[in-house]
Every structure is written in structure tokens, then in C-alpha cells.
Amino acid sequence: MKVSIVVALSSAAISHAWAPVSNRSFRQATSLNAASIWYSTSTGNTETIAGYIAEASGLSANDIGDATADEISGADALIVGAPTWHTGADEQRSGTSWDDWLYDTLPNLDLDGKKVAVFGCGDQESYNDYYCDAAGELYDQFVAKGCKVYGFTSTEGYIHSESKAVRDGKFIGLMCDEDNQYDMSEGRAKAWIEQLKSEGFF
């Protein structure tokens, strides 16, 4: 009995060893695994949204302050998100690591043609005229580097007055409000990931 068990295991091992490479490495080769999530946060709200996106997509969320140039340049697709802290500012609106990264690191990277999806976090009631403005800054800077942005969403269901994250009547990505609409954030994140999949982002 012992001999037959060993032989069975050995046969399985041999079969696996000679399995086609494409079968063994399928997960590593998928487009989904070539995407990555990058965020930075001030109060933890943007990290919460990044967590919802990570759970819905199966990706891991990372702080942009820890990113290497190779990690950003090497990804086929980037999901990037920021809060808005410096309301009314023309640049460096997030009050996070993004403020330096966008102007010190991003200009040195070759990202032409890369897929990008943007998410933002803001407070519609306290900062009604500046809702998710930093997300608009992410959009502007990545587009300036030749990236193609996916995942535009409707502004319906929001209560803001003005936002620099709006282009042609739509948000440039997923916008969430953990202060006033926290119960909607997870559902919005799940729906957004499904939208990105349908758009061919992954």
C-alpha cells in the first residue's frame, strides 16, 4: 500500500512538471494581475475606498509614497486615488504623498498609452465647491503623460456644487464621500470595477 501511494504521488508530480507552461502560469499572465492600485490618505477615508476597490478587483492597495518607478512603469494599468485637502489650490491639492510625487516623480516616467482609472474622496457638505478636486489633478497629470483614463461616472446622486474632477458633465472616475455617503461607497466601488471590466481596462 505504501509503495502504491508513493507511485501515485510521483506520477502526479511528473504530470505537473510536464504540464504546459501556459496552464501553470495562467494567473500571473492575466491582465488583472498586471494592474495595481495606488493611493495616499490623510484621515484614512481614501484608504478605506482603496480597500473596497481592492476587494472588488482582487488586487492589493499600495501607498504611492512607497512606489518605485519600476512598479509604476511596469504595470499595464494603474488605479490611482487621492483625497482633497488643500481646497481651492491650483496644484498639490491632496495634502498627501501625491503632492510631491506628481511633480517630482511622474514627469520622469514613460507612461504613454498606459491605462489609468482615478478615484477620489471628499466631503460634499463641508467643501461643497471643492468636491474631490485632487482627483481632477490626478487626471490632468496622468493625461499629460499620455495615459488613457477609463471609468468615467455619472454625477447623479451627489450633492456637491463644484468639482475639478468633472469633465464634460461626468466625474473622471469613482468619487466617494465617507463623511456623508459612507453607506454608498462599497457599492459604488463594486459597480465601478464591473464598469472597468466592461470597458476593457483589465
Image (cartoon, grey):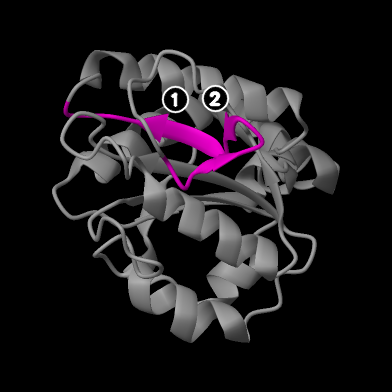
Q: Is residue 117 above or below residue 49?
A: below
Q: Which residues are magenta?
A: 163-179
**Amino acid at circle 1:** Ala
Residue 196, percent across and down? 65, 30
Q: Nearer the viewer, residue 60 or 107?
A: 107
Are discs 2 and 1 less than 8 Å apart at CB?
Answer: yes
Q: Is residue 165 magenta?
A: yes
Residue 2, percent across and down? 51, 26
Q: Which mark is residue 192?
A: 2
Q: Nearer the viewer, residue 112 or 2?
A: 112
- Quadrant position of residue 76: bottom right
Residue at image coords 54%, 37%: 173
- Quadrant position of residue 85: bottom left
Q: Nearer the viewer, residue 1 or 159?
A: 159
Residue at image coords 42%, 45%: 60
Q: On the rendered structure, is 26 left or right of 22?
A: left
- Quadrant position of residue 189: top left
SS class, disc 2: helix
State the quadrant of the C terminus. Answer: top right
Q: Which mark is residue 5?
A: none
Circle 1 packing at 10 Å, graded few (<14), some (14-19), many (20+), is many
SS class, disc 1: helix
Residue at image coords 57%, 68%: 72
Q: On the rendered structure, is 101 left or right of 181?
A: right
Residue 105, percent across and down? 49, 82
Can residue 1 be seen from the camera position used here? no
Instruction: Determine the CA span between mark 2 and mark 1.
Output: 5 Å
Q: Which mark is residue 189?
A: 1
